[in-house]
Amino acid sequence: MTPIDAIVAQLTQLHPKRIDLALDRMWRILAALGDPQRRLPRTIHVAGTNGKGSTIAFMRAILEAAGLRVHVYTSPHLVRFNERFRLGAEREGRLVSDAELGDALRECERVNAGAPITVFEITTAAALLLFARNAADVLLLEVGMGGRLDATNVIDRPLASVITPVSFDHAEHLGDTLGKIAAEKAGILKPAVPAIVAAQPREALAAIERVAARAKAPVKIAGEDWTATEERGRLVYQDAAGLLDLPAPRLYGRHQFENAGVAIAALRTLGDFELAQNAFEVGIAKADWPARMQRLSHGRLLALCPPGSELWLDGGHNADGARAVANALADLEERVSRPLVLVIGMRAASWRCRSRGRRRVFPPRSSPMRRARSASPRKALMTSTPRSPPSRNSASSPRRAS
């Protein structure tokens, strides 16, 4: 256990007996800290179910390519708790150090004075404290769960609010219909602050537009105000300001073209930054987000795979995330003549999708899917391995996400 893990374990003792989404505890601890949320850099607030991390990764890479210093707050982490906190610096930011994060968490614990608070709330308070004390040009702030009552929803006037694709997730807290969930996500929208909305199911979009109308937030919607498509292996983005012909994203999968489009739309909507086309070109090609259709080229697990095979990893955890992975896997099998091994972790209920009864997200194929239990009873680990290499002539290598 690292020193940071030990601090976080101690903070779990303050966790309320049940998760009740509310902002009272956040306002209390922020007031005790001197309201760091009022001293933040210009902020882009990002909610949604799928694609938040990838969209933020694209925005960060573009902004850094333009020479800007970018703070980033995301969750959950993949390996180290520190991954949630990225401090902006010249050329490229850095993860917060153990010493910096430990000091911030202990300060938050001290001013909280033993009162009930969730781990996410107190770590969000620590993040805002760190971001307020370290200079940067932009803060990319990811919602933890929902939006309206999320611990990050304490920013009075962000530069923009972004809503990535909404699907079923955390229904026990956000609602049992797509419309209810989307309305909770749209709770981050603010008056006169532009809202950039990814392509959505009809029910979700209708709910978002109702909330935006009440909040008097101007809305820009994928497919209506901009398009982002793959053409001849490149990303072609177009909006009212013109067309961008860009390299394909380094992140693999057709859904990453859509995520990149949302990121570009958000940055082009803002008048605060003068971003040259070169920043978009460099950023789209450079953006990286581990465990999102990431090809693993080394490590002990690779040695366990069939000879000559490719090993891929994805951390998508719900039905729509599984659907995106299934599409990416199908594209890979069309292009690669080698055996493919996919390791994916998701909620066990997401093994099947919600639409049309209980149809499988991963359709029957020549590649058998093997399911194994994980340490969490709510999650499953799956691998896909072809019985034999496909009889295709293509030997081109896919872009690597790692």
Image (cartoon, rainbow, N blue to C red):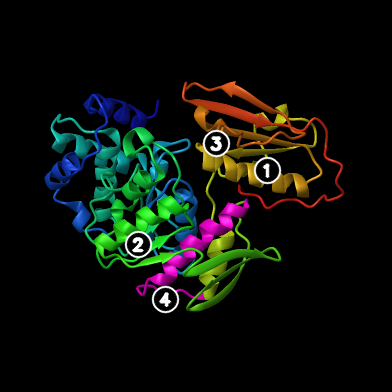
Alpha carbon distance from label 4 to label 3: 42 Å
Where is 4 relative to 270, above or below?
Answer: above
Instruction: Give the residue pinned by disc 3.
Output: 353
Are the residues at dot 1 and dot 2 in contact (C-beta closer than 8 Å)? Answer: no
Alpha carbon distance from label 4 to label 1: 37 Å
Instruction: Give the residue pinned by disc 2.
Output: 138
The type of residue carrying mark 3 is: Cys
Instruction: Identify the mark nearer the N-term, 4 or 3.
Output: 4
Alpha carbon distance from label 2 to label 3: 37 Å
Mark 3 crowd level (few <14, some 14–19, many ≥20, 10 Å Cα):
some
Instruction: Identify the mark nearer the N-term, 4 or 1.
Output: 4
The numbered disc on residue 274 is 4
Q: Is residue 98 left or right of residue 110?
A: right
Look at the numbered disc 3 and give the secondary structure of its residue.
loop
- Of circles 4 and 1, the one toward us is 1
The type of residue carrying mark 2 is: Val
Are the residues at dot 2 and dot 3 in contact (C-beta closer than 8 Å)? Answer: no
Instruction: Identify the mark nearer the N-term, 3 or 1.
Output: 1
Mark 2 crowd level (few <14, some 14–19, many ≥20, 10 Å Cα):
many
